Amino acid sequence: MDRVAVDDPRAFPELVRRFQGRVTNLVSRVLNDRECSDDLAQEVFVRVYVHRRNYRHGSKFSTWVFTIAANLAKNEIRRRVRKRNWFSLDALEETLKDRVIQLADSTESRETMLEREQLQEAVGRAIATVPEKYRLALVLRDIEGLPYEEIAEVLGIPGGTVRSRINRARGMLKHKLQPLLAKAGDS
Amino acid sequence: MICNRARRLFGACWDDELTQAERDGLEGHLASCPPCRTEYDEFARALELTASLPRIEASADFMDRVLVRSRRATTAPDFVREAGSRWVPVAVAAAGAVLVVAAMLVGSNLQWKTPASSQVPQIVKVEGPREPRIVPIPSVKPGERRPEAHQGSAESLFDPDKNVEFVLGSAAVSGGRVKRDPEGQRPVITF
C-alpha cells in the first residue's frame, strides 16, 4: 500500500490482483446480484486508489478495503430498499449454477451434483434474506473468516455487538435452513 | 448445565472459543439431551454449508476495468462541465429569502420600538461617563432641514474619520459615520 501511495505503477494492479477475489465474493454474497457486485467491487478499488494517501498505517489494508466494500454494499442495499427493488434471486441462482458446475467434482453423479447445487442455492437465498446489519457480520465472519476484532473495525461497532449480531445471524440462518437441514438429517 | 445455557455456547463452541470447563460442560449436556444435540448438529451443518459456498470470482476483465476507472477518477474531465450545479440557484434563492425575512423582522422590530409619532431612534452622546443611549428624535420629510439640536457636533465619542459599528438588538448596523458640525450641541451618528 505504501508503494501505491507513492504512485508506483506496478503496486496498484498487484493490490487489485490480491484482493479482487475476496472483495467480489464479499459484495456478491451480501448483495446477491452478480452483475452489480462486479461493478461495486470495481468501485471499491477505485476508491482505494483515489484515497490511497488517506490510508492509515495503523490498521491492516484488508480491514480498510473491507470497510470500503461493506459501506458501499450497505449503501447499495439501502438504495434498493428505497427503490423497493429487492434482490435479484434469479441472478444469484444463475451465478451459483455457473460456479457449482465449475467446482463440482467431475466424478460426482449428476444426481449428487444437482442436490449439491440446490443446497447451495438455498443457502445463498437464505443468507440474502438475513437483515442487512446481521448479514454483513455473518458474511465477514463465516464466509470471509475475519476475526471478530477486525469485523468490529470494519463495521465500526464494538466487539460485543459484533458477537451478538453474528449469533443472531447464525440463529436466523439456521432457522431459515431448518426444513432443508431436517430433510438432510432424515436421509 | 441447562439447555438455555448450553445453546448460548453453540457459537463460541463453533468458533473454538470455549474454556476447557465450558467445553466439558457442553459436551456432557449434549450427550444427555437429544433435543440440544439435534439443535447443535443443525447449527453446525448450517454454518458448514455457509462456509463451503463456492467463491464468486471477479470477472475476467476486472483488473482492466478497475485501472481504467481509477485513471478516469483521478484525471481532469475532458469535457466542459455545464455551468454550475442546479442546486446553486436554489441555494442562492434560499439565502436571499432568508435575508429578506431577516430584514423584515429587523424592520418590524425597530418599528415596535418607535413611538406612535413615527420618530426615528438615533444614538447621541450624553453628559458624564454614561454610555450612549438611543433617544427618539422627530423624523424629517425629504427636503426638510433637520432641527439644529439634532445635528452632529464635534464632541464625538468616536473618531469621525472611521467607520463605526453598532449592534442594535439582534441586528448589526455598520458603516455609520459621525458628522463634524461646529455649531451642533449634540453629536448625531447617521448611517
Image (spheres, rainbow, N blue to C red):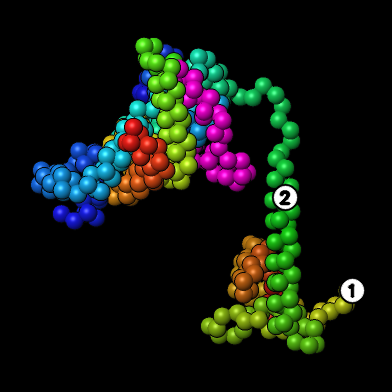
Q: Chain of mark 2?
A: B
- Dominant secondary-structure state across the stretch colored magenta: helix
* Residue B181 drawn at (x, y percent): 73, 73
* Residue A85 drawn at (x, y percent): 61, 41
Residue on which the image places disc 1:
B143
Toward the bottom, the furthest residue is: B116
Residue B73 appears anywhere in the view: yes
Q: Chain of mark 1?
A: B
- Which circle's residue, 2 or 1, is located before the other in the chain? 2
Instruction: Tell me, yes or no, whether dots 2 and 1 are on the same chain.
Output: yes
- In the image, B186: left or right of A99? right
* Residue B24 drawn at (x, y percent): 11, 45
As drawn, B13 above or below B114: above
Asked if residue A97 lies in the magenta stretch, the reply is yes
* Residue depicted at 60% across the width and 79% down the height: B132
| Quarter of the rendering occupied by the C terminus of chain A | top left
- In the image, B191: left or right of B56? right
Residue B90: numbered disc: 2
Between B181 and A50, the residue placed more toward the observer is: A50
Toward the top, the furthest residue is: A107
Q: Could you tell me how far apart the alpha carbons at marks 2 and 1 are, in whole angstroms?
A: 42 Å
| Quarter of the rendering occupied by the N terminus of chain A | top left
* Mark 2 secondary-structure assignment: helix
* Residue B6 drawn at (x, y percent): 21, 50
* Residue depicted at 72% across the width and 50% down the height: B90
* Residue depicted at 74% across the width and 70% down the height: B104
- Mark 2 residue type: Val
Label 2 CA crowd tier, 10 Å (few <14, some 14–19, many 20+): few
- Point out the stretch of residues depicted in magenta: A72-101
